Image (cartoon, rainbow, N blue to C red):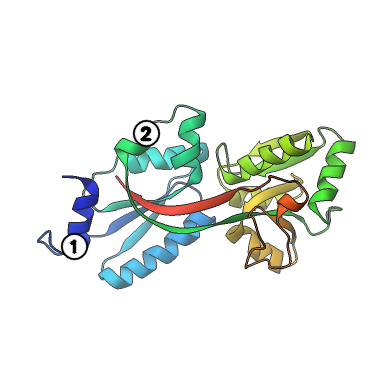
Amino acid sequence: MNKLLWLILLVCGTAGAQYPSKPVKLIVAYPPGGSSDLMARVFAAKLTDMWGQQVLVENKPGAAGAIGTEYAARQPADGYSFMIANLGPIAVNPLLSSVPYNVEKDFAPVSQISQGPNVLVVRADAPFQSLKDIIDFGKANPGKLSYGTSGPGSVSHLSSEMLKNITKIQATEVPYKGGVDAVKDLLGGQIHFIFSDTLPAMAHVRAGKLRALCTTGTENFTLLPDQAPCQQAAPGLVAVNWWGVVMP
């Protein structure tokens, strides 16, 4: 049966048996604490209340989301496994390299749940007060800047590559399993900046440990209304992430 039709029948209760009759698995292809994980936990709590059955978050990080996405693709197509999907593993990575799953054949889309820009952050004691400061430093000191990413194909990776391409600065990428690990090293001074998912960065911005310089959307972002879009300093630097739910 077509997976989408099956899901509609399942949710509407026309498939017969009471659903769900056992715990449901919600897979996240990144470590705990990142945007995908935080959204999954909110989503799981709401579904647990609605269904009266546990929805368990299972983190399977690694390889820029490919490990968790392959794991999700190999789960039974019985309605008891879902995955929080985002731009990198679903849309970008299959274009950049060979991945151990086929998005069109292995998954059925359920719903988009969120979208938003990334935020460029530096340590609060860094000398950079704006994106222009980073660009000026990069041009004056070729190869001395380093930045973190959530791995190939992530919005943090794409935003950084766009910045280098637009401004012609040289900087060294340091890839991580997820944005939380990159932010941790940024706080520790191991890297200079990251285009972070908003959720893992905001707590540190509000605590005064990180400084937000700009966001990668086309207009001012609700959570950071005083920060102008990055494209004002680097025209064309626009990259918006999205999150959704898919099922095998």
Dot label at residue 101: 2
Dot label at residue 195: none
Number of marks present in the image shown: 2
Give the quarter of the figure containing the N terminus: top left
Up/down of 7 relative to 104, above or below: below
Q: Considering the numbered disc 2 on the image, is that residue within a helix, a strand or a loop?
A: loop
Residue shown at the point (12%, 58%) measured from the top left: 15
Residue shown at the point (28%, 43%) measured from the top left: 75
Instruction: Report the side of 18 relative to 47 (left or right).
Output: left
Identify the image quadrant of residue 100.
top left
Q: Considering the numbered disc 1 on the image, is that residue within a helix, a strand or a loop?
A: loop
The residue lying furthest to the left in this view is 16
The residue lying furthest to the right in this view is 140
Circle 1/circle 2 CB separation < 8 Å? no
Residue shown at the point (67%, 43%) measured from the top left: 148
Identify the image quadrant of residue 105.
top left
Residue 134 rendering spot, x and y as whole percentages: 82, 46
Residue 147 rendering spot, x and y as whole percentages: 71, 42
